[in-house]
Structures are given as C-alpha cells and as structure tokens.
Amino acid sequence: MPDDQTSREAELRQTFAIFNEVAIVAQLSRTMFEARLPDGAGVPHFSLVNHLTRVRDGQTPLALARAFQVPKNTMTHTISGAVKHGWVVLKPHPTDGRSKTVWLTEAGRAFRKEAIAALAPDLAEVNAATTPEDRAALLERLTELRVFLDAYRDPKGSSG
C-alpha cells in the first residue's frame, strides 16, 4: 500500500498532466482557429470581442487587462486593433473623465459570428471523433476547473 507521500506525488503528477494536456489542446486549437480568422485578425481580437459578448461590454481597458491577465499596454494594443477593424468603439467613462469604456459594434458581433462559423468544419471533425456525452462531460469538468482557477487567481473577485 503506497504511503501518503507517494500518493501526494502521484496526485501532483496527475494534476500536472491535466494542465499539460490543456496547454497542448490550447496551442492546437489556437493554431487551428488562427488559420480560419480573416487577414489582420488575431486570436486576441477575437478573444476581446468574445469576452465583451459573453461577459458584458462597456468595460474599461484596465478591467479588461485584469480579466485577461495581461499588462494594460497589451490590452490597449489589442483594443486599438479592434477599433481599427471597427469591431469596438471607445466611449468616455460615465463617471471618470480620465478613462474610456470599450463597446461592441454590430461589425464586432458579425466578426464573432463569422469567425465561429468559419471554424465549423473543424468543430464538425471534433464532433465526429467524440460522442455528445463525452463532450458534455468534458465541458462540465473544464468549466469547473476554469471557475476554480478564476476564483483562485482573484479571491476578491476583482478581475473585471
């Protein structure tokens, strides 16, 4: 019977293996997605538009930088590119004259919809290789992990 130390080490190796697999899946899916995006668009642009759609628009660049865990200047650069494409607009902050807020445009919503549609052939291949039950179980487990990690990185909930 293994001792407690051996069990803990095995658990740590298993958890590391999970993170390793997630990282590989992230890299493979990112490369697949980038190949489907229109010229001049990158995953950071899509991620910004997707976040504003999924969470809410009208956030400040600083709140978005915190949510994405990137430096503010990186987020400012991503927002600038999205503005140039017409996917978002900047508006004055309603209570802080020094700040701006980021808002989706109809073009941004269309970009998101078209990007997801462009990925459909690849998603169909994934669907053909997996069962609906396996995808549902995987989604549930990954969502639980994401919720935990989001709370773990920011226990006060100030990530934006």
Image (cartoon, helix red, strand yellow):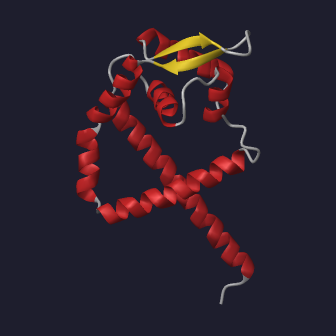
Please give the count of numbered marks on the rendered protein: 0
Q: Where is residue 132 in the image (x, y as percent from the top left)?
A: 30, 61
The one nearer the camera, 50 or 34, is: 50
Q: On the rendered image, what quadrant is the N terminus found in?
A: bottom right
Q: Position of residue 85 (x, y in %)?
A: 42, 12
The correct choice, above or below, for 38 with respect to 134 in the image is above
Q: Where is residue 28 in the image (x, y as percent from the top left)?
A: 40, 43
Res 29 visible:
yes
The one nearer the camera, 18 or 146, is: 146
The one nearer the camera, 23 or 77, is: 77
Q: Residue drawn at (47%, 27%), measured in percent from left and top?
A: 49
Quadrant for residue 65, please give it.
top right
| Residue sitting farthest toward the front | 94
The correct choice, above or below, for 122 with respect to 85 in the image is below
Q: On the rendered image, what quadrant is the C terminus found in?
A: top right
Is 109 left or right of 92, judged from the image as shown? left
Q: Position of residue 92 (x, y in %)?
A: 64, 10
Q: Residue drawn at (64%, 21%), measured in percent from left and top?
A: 61
Q: Residue drawn at (33%, 30%), measured in percent from left and top?
A: 113
